[in-house]
Amino acid sequence: MLEPPSRRRRTIAIANQKGGVGKTTTTVNLGASLAEMGLRTLIVDLDPQANASTGLGVNPRNVEIAMYDVLLHDAPIEDAIEGTSVRNLFVAPSSLDLAGAEIELVPAFSRETRLKQAIDSVGDRYDYVLIDCPPSLGLLTVNAFCAANEVLVPIQCEYYALEGLGQLLRNVDLVKKNLNPNLDVSTIVLVMFDARTNLSTQVASEVRSHFGDKVCRQVIPRSIRLSEAPSFGQPITTFDSKSRGAIAYRSLAKEVHGEPT
């Protein structure tokens, strides 16, 4: 009897070393929107703040096996994965212990590829794996870059939006040359866009002139409902299904997946 064909998984690291740029918001809501399209999606929470986990209704304090155990103690990632309230959406949660992982990984064997090995062990069960990176360029983010074949960068439509982005791109290039030749920055997403301000329009124009076709057509608006949803442990698509934020992330998911919007 023939084995069923394996899924062609897309593994995307969602990264920006600046904090507060909508990285976790994009991970959670893009993931929920892809899942809504019938695509099995796994969110790997690699940020010690565990915001992606709590944003999906998982309390890190009640988790028995988290990404810390997967990376440092060789726990199978399948033992860490939990379902969410959204059909087809799963999460491998973070925990506060992950804060020490940057230091603990330094002497570890195969320290840069531990996440890749973990994801590869279950990857054929998912259409998408989205990795929420911490706001730094340390070993956790390097693990994400080694495991991924794409990097998605959210850029806020505010002053200093491009500050520090050069270092992120250099790190991606270093990982590509030395550890993962399949890695590319595939997608730039403009977030916190406020159509009422000239600044948002100017930043969007500047980012598009820098990165061209890598920049998604769909922008994510600045939205109070998007900010409120995580405190209820829900993505925007279930918290307020008809809001501007939900509509924008559904459109973004179609664009990322290659469907007409």
Image (tube, grey):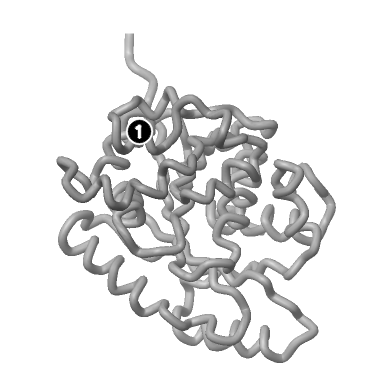
Expressed as whole percent of the image width and height from the top left, the position of residue 209 reads 49, 87
Q: Is residue 149 visible?
A: no
Who is closer to the viewer here, 198 or 68?
Answer: 68
> Is residue 255 or residue 66 the one in the foreground?
66
Q: Where, by quadrant of the figure, is residue 78 drawn?
A: top left
Residue at the spot 58% in from the left edge and 67% down from the top edge: 20
User: Who's the residue at 65% across and 46% down the image?
Assistant: 33
Q: Quadrant of the C terminus?
A: bottom right
Towards the viewer: 195 or 192? 192
Q: Residues within 10 Å of mark 1 (few under 14, many from 20)?
A: some
Task: State the quadrant of the N terminus.
Answer: top left
- Comparing 71 with 190, the one in front is 71
| Drawn side of residue 219 relative to residue 148, left or right | right
Where does label 1 land, which residue? 70
Residue visible at 82% across and 49% down?
240
Q: Position of residue 72 (x, y in %)?
A: 29, 36
Percent across and percent down for residue 88 are: 60, 32
Q: Position of residue 2 (x, y in %)?
A: 32, 14
* Residue 198 appears left or right of 190: right
- Amino acid, disc 1: Val
As drawn, 121 above or below 135: above
- Total labels drawn: 1
